[in-house]
Amino acid sequence: MLATAIIVFREVVEAALVIGIVMAASRGVARRGRWVGSGVLGGLLGACVVAGLADRLAEVAAGMGQELFNAIVLFTAVALLGWHNVWMQRHGRELAQQMTRVGRAVLSGERPLYALAVVVGLAVLREGAEVVLFLYGIASAGEGSAISMLTGGALGIALGSALGLTLYFGLLRIPARHLFTVTSGLILFLAAGMAAQGAAYLIQADWLPPLGREVWNTSEFLSEESPLGQILHTLVGYVARPDGMQIVFYLATLAIIGGLMRRVGGGSKTHRPAS
């Protein structure tokens, strides 16, 4: 549930920021709410299509073996999570500035009203599609039941929407870059945990050597079945009895994604909402 809530919260906040920036920049335009609402609806419908395609792909690939298929889904989710963090680290501010320019162009009459629906719809579609693929990876890893994922998704939507509204109305003065720094770190560890789980599936399918069975065993101190163990397993990929290959994949994921984020970020392109 925690992983679902974190991912959904992050994506909803990003979509809400785009919507809020466009709405703020186009203030005074007649029927802007109708066009922005149409864009949101279109983006959500597109995300539903992506969800349907994901289920279809699972049916087609069912014959390749459950462990191999689960590993492919997990590594795809890891790649998308990493790309997402790196891209936002580099282009977050540029995206906010671009949305502001679109809103002002509509306000001045330089661009048609439907431009609001297009930019908002694409933003919602992008974030919604990412949520679908990420949650499919979580489900493949067996991280939680459908009820817990629905609960986490509802929590993420509620918190993300509330924060987006708060930012839009100017009631929150905490710089958004701090919020995204925290969520980027959480998503980084989520990706590392998914990579380790994917490696475990490949070991089960005899596609990878274990590089040592149960390199350590901390079950006596902290079981994965305990409440704290489950929370740490979700948030940071804690495994009580990891194989060596799982450790390699975990550390490599942290090093690669974290290194790319530091390289492209440089502290000067963090995501900030436009005023």
Image (cartoon, rainbow, N blue to C red):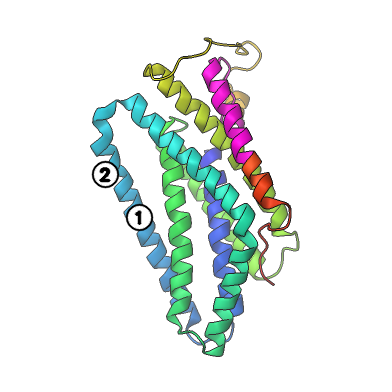
Name the residue furthest bottom.
109
Q: Amino acid at mark 1?
A: Cys
Rendered view: 12 above or below 110: above
Q: Amino acid at mark 2?
A: Arg
Rendered view: 194 above or below 111: above
Q: CA distance from mark 2 to mark 1?
A: 13 Å
Q: Earlier in the sequence, mark 2 or mark 1?
A: 1
For this rendering, which residue is in front, 31 or 26? 26
Q: Main secondary structure of the magenta part?
A: helix
Q: In the rendered structure, does residue 145 fall within the stretch colored magenta?
A: no
Rendered view: 229 above or below 88: above
Quadrant location, the C terminus: bottom right
Q: Secondary structure at mark 1?
A: helix
Image point (43%, 60%), residue name: 125
Specify few, some or many for label 2: CA neighbours under 10 Å numbering under 14, 14-19, or 20 or more.
Answer: few
> Magenta region: which residues?
233-258
Is residue 237 at all visible to an observer of this figure?
no
Image point (32%, 26%), residue name: 66
> Which residue position is annotated with label 2?
56
| Percent x, y of residue 251 | 61, 28
> Which residue position is annotated with label 1?
48
| Percent x, y of residue 257 | 60, 40
Residue 87: which numbered mark, if any?
none
